[in-house]
Amino acid sequence: MSKPRIRDFGVPLEGQTGPLNAITDVPGVTVGHVTLIQGDGRRQVGKGPVRTGVTAIRPRGERPDPVLGAWYSLNGCGEMTGTTWLEESGLLLGPVMVTNTYSVGVVRDAVIEWFIRKYQSIIGMPVVAETYDGTLNDIEGFHIRGEHARQALEAAVAGPVEEGNVGGGTGMTCHGFKGGIGTSSRVLAEQEGGWMVGVLVQANHGQRRHLRVAGAPVGQEITNLLPEIHSGDFSIDRSSIIVIVATNAPLLPHQLKALARRVPLGIARVGGNGEIFSGDIFLAFSTQPLGNPDERDARAVQMVNLPALTPLFEATAQATEEAILNALAAAETMTGCDGNTYYALPKDRLVEVLKKYGRHV
């Protein structure tokens, strides 16, 4: 049974989606998840309950060829490895992995081992990003192992992308509701190049009072169903969001950085404000073919003309907004460590609020 998506509830959103409305609408991109859900009740470090996972994004699917890329941090209370070399070289040399905060190291090491064994080649600096799931998950138990990262990589496929409580998003929360993985895409009009832009988010950010859906103040209207927290000091806002943007438009690294800088516009539409303890880190890559080195060791690449960037900027903001909302729509109520509970966004009440503010279609 497929999970609901935000458009199923009459939410008016801008832009033309791709056929799957997912990052995998960008030709060649594949996504895989490994989800770990085990145990209930009191937190016992090392035993559970476990509510976590790993998500893998492979820019060229089975092919190990590099792509051009760039990254941007709205607020840096988080981690995305490999960004120093990405900034220096403009090349993304392998997959992008997303997991929980304390599992970055083991996932990074597993990617190196997997890449060397699979392709008999050195990967360089793997890109692994994180958000914190310690409210619902026994994060200090280090339940993610190298085999889970490898399984996510091998599970990566084209086609529909599972959303909500899956992969790296399993234990994540968003605007005071259950969050997780979400994705969306936009296809530009032919006169704008016909390029595809796809976005995948791991949404673990935002405050309830700021949540807006298509402009309607949903977070101010739905004031119950608040998180039930029985353990841990959560007075500090630990929310974060990781966003991965893919496109087949021929963009150079400085143009891809400009694309990544438009991600916050989509986050803001839903009510994210980049709080000081929020890790809001974004990566953008282009799947354009990189020509083979010629006799002078030069590669032939293309770049879109400057006026063509504006539609790509708009598509990025639109797809980011919808990807976050898709994460909220797909996520289900989850109880984790010590009975800590985050509730799913109630869809019937969402529709009521949209109608109240004239935003339902």
Image: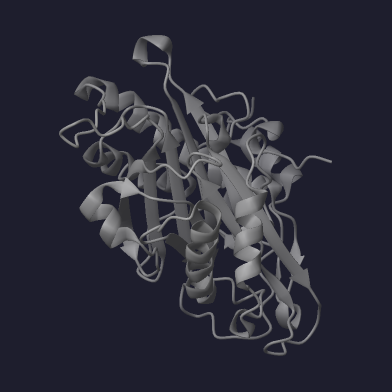
Q: Is residue 278 visible?
A: yes
Q: Residue furthest top?
A: 191
Kindly indicate the quadrant of the structure image that contains residue 23: top right
Q: Quadrant of the N terminus?
A: top right
| Colour scheme in use | one colour
Q: Is residue 268 above or below residue 75?
A: above
Spot occupied by residue 86 in the image (x, y as percentages of width and height): 29, 54
Residue at 39%, 71% in the rendered image: 277
Relative horizontal placement of residue 67, taking residue 5 as reference (left or right) = left
Q: Position of residue 69 (x, y in %)?
A: 33, 44
Asked if residue 128 lies left or right of residue 154, the reply is: left
Q: Residue at x 59, y 31 (%)?
A: 21
Count of numbered labels shown in the rendering: 0
Q: Residue furthest left?
A: 296
Please state which of residues 88 and 175 is positioned toward the viewer in this rendering. Answer: 88
Q: Nearer the viewer, residue 303 or 217?
A: 303
Report the residue at 52% width, 21% height from top.
16
Question: Can residue 222 be seen?
Answer: no
Q: Position of residue 263 (x, y in %)?
A: 38, 44
The residue most toward the bottom is 44
Q: Return the residue found at the far front.
A: 295
User: Is 29 on the left-hand or right-hand side of 72?
Assistant: right
Question: Would you place residue 206 above or below residue 227 in this image?
Answer: above
**Depicted 18 relative to depicted 318: above or below:** above
Quadrant showing the C terminus: top right
Tell me the quarter of the picture where residue 216 sits. top right
Q: Nearer the viewer, residue 102 or 85?
A: 85
Where residue 125 sits: x, y (%)?
A: 36, 61
Near-viewer residue (280 or 83): 83
Residue 144 located left or right of residue 333: left
